Image (cartoon, rainbow, N blue to C red):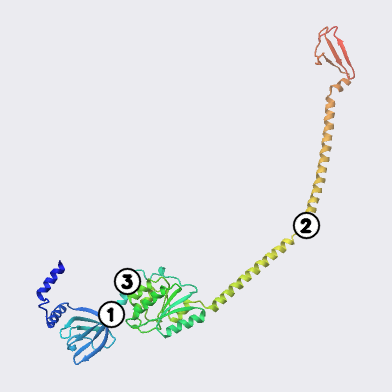
Amino acid sequence: MQEKADLESQSKVSSEHSPWRVSQLSKSLKDWVEKLGRVWVEGELQQIQLRGSNLFGSLRDLDTENSVEIHAFEASDVDIEVGLAQGDRVVALVQPAFWGKNGKLTMRVLKMHKVGLGELLERIEKLRQQIIKEGLTDPARKKALPFLPGKIGLVTGANSDAEKDVLQNARNRWPEVEFEVIHTLVQGDRAAAEIIMAIQQLDAMSDVDVIIVARGGGSFQDLLPFSDERLVRAAAALSKPLVSAIGHENDQPLLDLVADLRASTPTDAAKRVVPDVEEERESIQTAMDRIHFRIISFIETQHQLIKSIVSRPVLASPFGFVDYQAEQLSLLTRRLTEILDWRLTQASSELGQIVTSVRALSPKLTMERGYAVITNEAGEILKQLTEGDEFTVQLAKQEIKATAKSVRNK
């Protein structure tokens, strides 16, 4: 319904039977475009021409192949910085303008100036603080470099000294090292986009273990692509370790902060990424020497221990222990025999004394001295008798049966 209403509205202005003239269309477009207002844009100056007091040229996008035409009539009457030239990075206040005669859209420049060093520094510092706040520079998130990478990805300028330094020094240290090299622009407004594409391409390769971005130093302006926010964030998002080898001392691009390793020069990057084969051989030889020394030392120690054990009397004369024990046994046997003889002698003496004591107390010995023992038929000793009692008189050598005829009590 809305589309039908729009068509009906347009038909009130023009129709198949009442079309506009081209000039009428151009005027309508001109009126509409000039209502768009003014806008600040940033870009690179291209094809700058001065015709009298008029300025013509184009303003190209910093990253993509996209540009718009610009002009300024009576350039001296508008706020345009003096000395602008081809390739300058500028910020401009423009207003769209449509030329009805040829149907051309251009941008009228009202103000224009170069992007100054102070402004760039301010932008970079603001971005620096932002990535630090987001934790992109945190050491805990940095990935460790492999000890010996199978293949190294290298992003650098074509036929550059940086490329030669990295390749030559790496191969001097480890001749078998392999590289996947991608050439890009390393300065200028389009460099950041090309570097981003290159590092992402290398990150997707399964056989690439580490990525180096190398450039042989340069001025502050030359190094601006390495502080581009898109490049910085792309580098932080890589799954593989990234080494930043921009080759600078005074200025530190933001890529250094998010890289897993910052190398001071491309040569330093080569030394940090691959080990030195000679140093590794020396380390291996040193380790082998230490192992050999430890083994020899251990064997010598054990040999001395065995010698000391073998030299002990028990092993020097195996039967010595038996002989010693036999001698001890003989000694103990003699000692035991002596003790037994002494104990038997003592026992015999004690027994003689007991026998003497028993004999002294024996009734038989008493009877041998003239005494007698009177017992009844049951063998009980009688202490008194009555008349008619039968009793037995026990003498030392006789036993007499008798009957009491008379008893006199005392």
* Label 3 crowd (10 A; few <14 / some 14-19 / many >=20): few
Residue 101 in picture, x, y percent from top left? 15, 86
Q: Secondary structure at mark 1?
A: helix
| Above or below, 385 relative to 28 | above
The reply to whether residue 46 is in sight is yes
Residue 318, numbered circle: 2
Residue 130, numbered circle: 3
Residue 39 in picture, x, y percent from top left? 20, 78
Residue 372 in picture, x, y percent from top left? 86, 17
Q: Secondary structure at mark 3?
A: helix
As rendered, which of 213 and 399 lies closer to the eye?
213
Q: Inspect the image, locate mark 2, and give the three-letter code of the amino acid beneath it.
A: Pro
Instruction: Tell me which label, 2 or 3, sits earlier in the chain.
Output: 3
Quarter the C terminus occupies: top right
Number of marks in the rendered image: 3
Residue 174 in picture, x, y percent from top left? 51, 79
The CA span between labels 2 and 3 is 86 Å
Q: Which residue is mark 1?
A: 119
| Above or below, 114 relative to 347 | below
Q: Inspect the image, locate mark 3, and give the three-letter code of the amino acid beneath it.
A: Gln
The reply to whether residue 114 is in sight is no
